[in-house]
Image (cartoon, grey):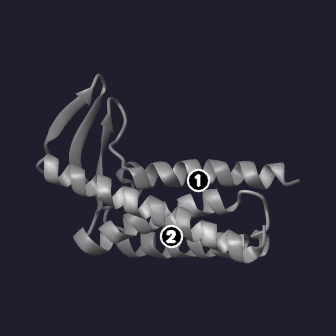
């Protein structure tokens, strides 16, 4: 696959993640009052919460530091992608990571915190952007390792 096609696919994956993330957050916010929970099925609730930190609420209130670290990491990912755009399937995990990061960034800009709503027992609440970032990182590691 050529570099232009890889960048196009990355854009489509990114846009799909952002759209799905923002749509599900809007649905959760409209269905559940902030701070409230609704049981969906055994062990999983929809809970309307805000996270000003990063994973598990760590570094709450460190907005500038989070933004700088995130920007550096995403810039590094874009450089890696630019240098390896022809690598088979690299566009998918890169698009998932970028889409997830942008989805959460939209929340931070719009409401000052990330909207989390998937709330399993014994695990902090999260959202689909978080799922995309985690699976994207795992996919990126897989793609990078299998290319050797």
Q: Which mark is residue 70?
A: 2
Q: Nearer the viewer, residue 105 or 60?
A: 105
Report the residue at 78% width, 67% height from top: 1
Q: Is residue 129 left or right of residue 138?
A: left
Where does residue 34 sit, x and y in percent of width and height? 14, 51
Where residue 84 appears, as percent x and y from the top left, is 78, 69
Of the numbered discs 2 and 1, the one sitting upstream in the chain is 2
Q: Residues within 10 Å of mark 2 (few under 14, many from 20)?
A: some
Q: CA distance from mark 2 to mark 1?
A: 15 Å
Q: Which residue is mark 1?
A: 136
Furthest residue in direction left, as rendered:
33
- Direction from residue 80 to residue 47 in the image, left or right: left
Q: Secondary structure at mark 1?
A: helix
Residue at (54, 58) in percent of width and height: 96
Q: Quadrant of residue 63?
A: bottom left
In this rendering, the answer to whether 60 lies above or below 71 is above
Q: Please identify, in this view, whether the residue under mark 2 or under mark 1 is nearer the observer.
A: 1
Q: Position of residue 58 (x, y in %)?
A: 39, 54
What element does badge 2 sit on?
helix
On screen, residue 16 versus residue 47, left or right, reads right
Residue closest to the far right: 148
In the image shown, does 117 or 6 lie closer to the viewer? Answer: 6
User: Where is 20 relative to 63, above or below?
Assistant: above
Instruction: Work out which residue is located at the far top of the displayed protein and give it.
Output: 42
Label 1 Cα neighbours within 10 Å, binned few <14 / some 14-19 / many ≥20: many
User: Residue 81: x, y in percent?
Assistant: 70, 70
Q: Are marks 2 and 1 in contact (CB under 8 Å)?
A: no
Can you tell which mark lies on residue 144?
none
Identify the residue at image location x=78%, y=72%. Answer: 2
């Amino acid at each position: 696959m050529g570099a232009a096609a890889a960048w196009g696919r990355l854009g489509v994956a990114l846009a799909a993640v952002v759209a799905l993330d923002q749509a599900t957050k809007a649905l959760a916010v409209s269905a559940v009052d902030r701070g409230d929970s609704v049981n969906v099925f055994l062990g999983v609730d929809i809970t309307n919460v805000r996270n000003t930190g990063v994973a598990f609420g760590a570094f709450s209130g460190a907005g500038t530091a989070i933004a700088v670290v995130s920007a550096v990491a995403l810039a590094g990912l874009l450089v890696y992608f630019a240098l390896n755009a022809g690598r088979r399937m690299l566009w998918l995990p890169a698009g998932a990571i970028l889409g997830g990061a942008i989805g959460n960034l939209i929340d931070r800009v719009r409401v000052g915190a990330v909207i989390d709503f998937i709330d399993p027992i014994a695990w902090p609440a999260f959202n689909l952007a978080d799922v995309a970032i985690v699976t994207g990182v795992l996919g990126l590691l897989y793609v990078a390792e299998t290319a050797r």
